[in-house]
Image (cartoon, rainbow, N blue to C red):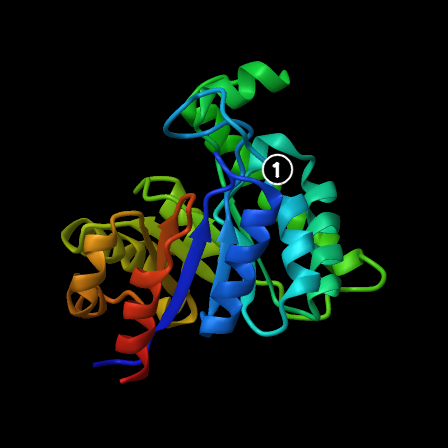
């Protein structure tokens, strides 16, 4: 079995800060390679008006309470923050973490967030155009910030749109995330390789991450590795049962 990384995404909904804190401390103690949250303002499942917390604030807390795992928001919605501000937030949390932050970003999709917080939802093509415009601004601001990030602060782009998103991955990203099942992942990965060829990028430079929320997918590690996934990220909601994460870690360490 090829070497791979294991991550856990802790869903910041229907929970408390104390329970979130206990979960990220447990994940760090287990030895995960990465810990993530998400960038929404309302729950994505269950009670639509249930308890929910903001992602980058949580990441800052994780940064000072963990020491080893990489940290990220899977993924930040480009629409919710000015690109320069996002770069500055990510740089600041990177310092808090000692250089462990991954800047995950995507075009955005959850309409309720937009409506309730006063952002223009627009259209999917419009949100992708906004992401394309934002990425160079983020990169430029990261180069200008004083002090600069401590770590590499790689940009991860989430999504699987073949015409635009995967082209942006080829042009800008150090990592790419999308979802399973393995057959879907394989098809999108092939398209990404085509987009890399079109822009003259070595696809080996892009870390391939895959996210899934079904604990049953843990049994398909080999299938994901066979189609090129290098970093497997399991989503967990409250009450944050990390037993399936332990199973992934056991497979990683064998």
Q: Which residue is mark 1?
A: 54
Give me the residue at 28% from left, 56% from top: 194
What secondary structure is found at the residue carrying circle 1?
A: loop
**Which part of the image, by quadrant, shows the N terminus?**
bottom left
Give me the residue at 56% from left, 29% from top: 41
Question: How many numbered circles does the render carry?
Answer: 1
In the rendered structure, the answer to whether residue 173 lies left or right of residue 2 reads right
Residue 99 seen from this side? yes
Nearer-the-camera pick, 231 or 228: 231
Nearer-the-camera pick, 25 or 74: 25
**10 Å crowding of disc 1: few (<14), some (14-19), many (20+):** some
- Answer with the quarter of the image where residue 115 lies: top right
Residue 139 seen from this side? no
Nearer-the-camera pick, 113 or 54: 54
Above or below, 6 against 183 in this view is: below
Q: Residue 232 at what x, y percent from top left? A: 33, 62
Q: Residue 87 at what x, y percent from top left? A: 70, 49
Give me the residue at 25% from left, 67% from top: 228
Give me the residue at 40% from left, 56% from top: 176
Above or below, 59 against 16 in this view is: below
Above or below, 238 against 68 in this view is: above
Q: Residue 151 at what x, y percent from top left? A: 66, 70
**Which part of the image, by quadrant, shows the C terminus?**
bottom left
Q: Residue 168 at what x, y percent from top left? A: 45, 48
**Residue furthest to the bottom:** 254
In the rendered structure, the answer to whether residue 158 lies left or right of residue 210 reads right
């Amino acid at each position: 079995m090829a070497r791979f990384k294991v991550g856990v995404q802790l869903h910041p909904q229907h929970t408390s800060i104390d329970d979130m804190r206990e979960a990220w401390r447990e994940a760090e103690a287990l030895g995960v390679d990465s810990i993530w949250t998400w960038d929404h303002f309302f729950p994505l499942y269950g009670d639509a008006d249930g308890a929910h917390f903001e992602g980058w604030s949580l990441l800052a807390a994780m940064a000072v309470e963990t020491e080893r795992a990489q940290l990220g928001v899977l993924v930040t919605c480009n629409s919710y923050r000015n690109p320069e501000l996002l770069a500055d937030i990510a740089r600041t949390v990177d310092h808090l973490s000692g250089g462990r932050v991954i800047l995950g970003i995507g075009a955005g999709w959850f309409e309720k967030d937009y409506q309730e917080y006063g952002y223009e939802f627009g259209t999917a093509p419009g949100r992708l155009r906004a992401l394309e415009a934002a990425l160079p601004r983020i990169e430029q601001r990261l180069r200008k910030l004083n002090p600069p990030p401590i770590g590499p602060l790689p940009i991860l782009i989430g999504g699987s749109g073949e015409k635009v998103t995967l082209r942006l991955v080829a042009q800008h990203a150090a990592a790419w995330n999308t979802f399973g099942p393995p057959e879907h992942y394989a098809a999108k990965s092939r398209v990404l390789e085509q987009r890399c060829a079109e822009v003259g990028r070595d696809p080996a430079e892009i870390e391939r991450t895959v996210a899934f929320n079904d604990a049953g997918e843990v049994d398909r590690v080999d299938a994901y590795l066979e189609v090129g996934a290098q970093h497997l990220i399991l989503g967990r909601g409250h009450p944050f049962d990390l037993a399936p994460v332990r199973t992934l870690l056991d497979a990683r360490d064998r």
